[in-house]
Image (spheres, rainbow, N blue to C red):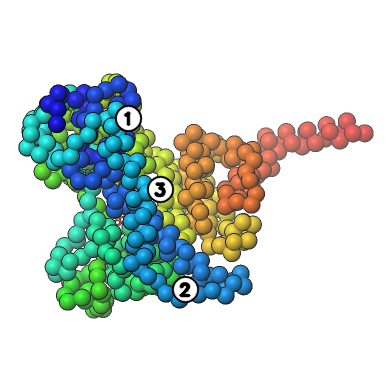
């Protein structure tokens, strides 16, 4: 490795680090990107890519089982889970070149493999070799946490880090955690023939989401055969048996722990560089992603901001711009979209849409069931609802969509929340028919039309109608 000080040292080549490095290089900086493991990070190797590939296989199985409703008599006669896992690995292999070192070199980024640790405010070691930097971005990600359940660590539990090393799926899996990972992977495995029991200590799945939307997802998991145990705590694990606080025992072949994540800062030497952490161990950042060391920014999961690839990318670009150009651009967290890729998908952005959520005076919730969406009817996928929150000026400030392809429907709602668009803006935009965006358009049209039936707008409509009648005489 060249000893020449980089203008920007980027630590970690996951989404945040890759985008930071490429952005800085495009701005003309001399960049060194150092990764201790595999270029591409969680999203490529253990997160989004493998999980969505597994979900695709599961969706195919569900489509065959559901074909009878269209008069197609097909059945899943066998599931070769070794081939399923091989197809997951093919997806990773197809995407991997985008994140490989050679691709970064072509974009002007110098790369190195090694473990980085700070030794001072502007110095690190890379696998023990000293290096000075001008500016740095910490993008070291997060890792799964193992809850403190007696016997758990000795049960060789799987996590989202290790699941993808399996060459086939186990027969019985007990999943700990009913968040995004537990729901996506629990449903996928159940659809692929695994006997899944999902244990969640909270009263319901997907705790942060609109309860009515999350209830539709929970019902779908149950229909797919997942044995959902909410409100239950794991009290111990012994010999392929998981004990719960209601006295029940769940027998499993493998345990999958999906009980949340923690920042990856082990051995990073943050204190030597004067980089503080918050009470949850995340690297403390301000709105510009600057750390408490004026030479160092942080990006992605390690900051404790919502843990999504799209936000990690935005972080990477913003941190690099601020570090290299001395800008003071701030990250915006009020319009970060999120999608849980269960079937139905649950997608949300902005202000909460729950019935009982506290909201400012004048805010209203517009709901459209997908039962009246023609596309959902033709597909026989009416298990969904679209809910928009609008403020007193009819601007869309939040949305939840649960249903088929909800993630796709969320894009325009994210634009609406980000840009402060009103229901009149949405209503006046021609949407294609029939599409899963119909409920959004219907809700917006109903709201915008309602406006014409009240107050000054109603008076104006009446006057214009009378004038038109007079002219027609
Ligand atoms: C199962 C699963 C499914 C997911 N699905 C989605 C999804 O569908 N959509 C979505 O938006 N998000 C999803 N996520 C979240 C997403 O994967 C993460 O938010 C994203 O990958 C975070 O990127 P990052 O760059 O911050 O961290 P990472 O990708 O974790 O990258 C950090 C890198 O830093 C390296 N590193 C750590 N310490 C050092 C060191 N000391 N020296 C050198 N290198 C170091 C690590 O090896 C790693 O490669 C999913 C996550 C999981 C686990
Ligand atoms: N589609 C996506 O964008 C996607 C998919 C997967 C993961 N992710 C990201 O990864 C992050 C981590 O996902 P996750 O599902 O691990 O975390 P999470 O924080 O979303 O959910 C963890 C769940 O585990 C439960 N839990 C805690 N302790 C437990 C215990 N002892 N036994 C059983 N359950 C326990 C919690 O109550 C919670 O419901 C998410 O926050 C998300 O940002 C995103």
As drawn, the label of residue 338 is 3
Q: Is mark 3 within 8 Å of ligand 2?
A: yes
As drawn, the label of residue 376 is none
* Residue 342 vs residue 72, the one in the foreground: 72
Please report whichever mark, 2 or 1, sits nearer to the chain's N-terminal start.
2
In the picture of the structure, the residue carrying the numbered disc 2 is 76
In the picture of the structure, the residue carrying the numbered disc 1 is 107
Q: CA distance from mark 1 to mark 3?
A: 30 Å
**Quarter of image, res 137:** top left
Label 1: element kind: loop
Residue 295 vs 423, above or below: the answer is above
Mark 2 or mark 3, whichever is nearer to me: 2
Please report whichever mark, 2 or 3, sits nearer to the chain's N-terminal start.
2
On screen, residue 46 versus residue 153, left or right, reads right
On screen, residue 358 versus residue 266, left or right, reads right
Residue at horizontal 29 percent and vertical 51 percent from the top: 45
């Amino acid at each position: 490795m060249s000893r020449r000080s980089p203008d920007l040292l980027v630590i970690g080549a996951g989404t945040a680090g890759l985008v930071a490095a490429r952005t800085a290089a495009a701005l003309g900086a001399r960049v060194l990107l150092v990764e201790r493991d595999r270029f591409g990070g969680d999203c490529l190797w253990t997160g989004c890519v493998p999980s969505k590939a597994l979900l695709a296989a599961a969706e195919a199985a569900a489509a065959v089982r559901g074909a009878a409703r269209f008069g197609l008599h097909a059945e899943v006669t066998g599931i070769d889970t070794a081939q399923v896992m091989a197809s997951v690995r093919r997806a990773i292999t197809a995407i991997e070149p985008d994140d490989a070192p050679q691709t970064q070199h072509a974009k002007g980024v110098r790369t190195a493999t090694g473990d980085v640790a700070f030794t001072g405010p502007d110095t690190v070691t890379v696998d023990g070799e000293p290096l000075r930097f001008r500016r740095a971005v910490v993008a070291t990600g997060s890792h799964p946490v193992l809850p403190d359940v007696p016997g758990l660590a000795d049960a060789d539990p799987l996590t989202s880090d290790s699941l993808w090393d399996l060459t086939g799926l186990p027969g019985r899996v007990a999943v700990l955690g009913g968040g995004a990972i537990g729901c996506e992977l629990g449903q996928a495995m159940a659809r692929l023939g695994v006997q899944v029991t999902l244990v969640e200590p909270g009263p319901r799945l997907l705790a942060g989401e609109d309860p009515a939307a999350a209830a539709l997802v929970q019902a779908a998991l149950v229909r797919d055969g997942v044995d959902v145990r909410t409100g239950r705590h794991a009290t111990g694990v012994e010999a392929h048996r998981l004990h719960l606080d209601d006295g029940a025992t769940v027998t499993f072949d493998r345990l999958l722990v999906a009980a949340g994540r923690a920042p990856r800062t082990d051995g990073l030497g943050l204190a030597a560089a004067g980089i503080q952490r918050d009470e949850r161990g995340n690297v403390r950042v301000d709105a510009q992603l600057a750390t408490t060391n004026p030479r160092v920014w942080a990006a992605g999961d390690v900051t404790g901001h919502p843990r999504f690839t799209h936000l990690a990318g935005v972080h990477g670009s913003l941190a690099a711009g601020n570090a290299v150009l001395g800008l003071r651009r701030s990250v915006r967290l009020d319009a970060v979209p999120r999608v849980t890729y269960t079937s139905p998908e649950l997608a949300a952005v902005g202000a909460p849409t729950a019935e009982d959520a506290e909201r400012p005076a004048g805010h209203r919730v517009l709901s459209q069931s997908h039962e009246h969406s023609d596309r959902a009817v033709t597909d026989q996928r009416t298990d969904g609802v679209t809910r928009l929150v609008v403020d007193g000026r009819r601007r869309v400030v939040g949305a939840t969509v649960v249903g088929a392809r909800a993630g796709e429907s969320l894009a325009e709602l994210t634009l609406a929340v980000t840009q402060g668009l009103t229901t009149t803006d949405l209503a006046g935009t021609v949407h294609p028919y029939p599409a899963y965006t119909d409920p959004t358009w219907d809700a917006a049209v109903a709201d915008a039309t309602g406006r014409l039936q009240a107050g000054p707008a109603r008076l104006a409509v009446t006057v214009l109608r009378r004038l038109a009648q007079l002219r027609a005489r």
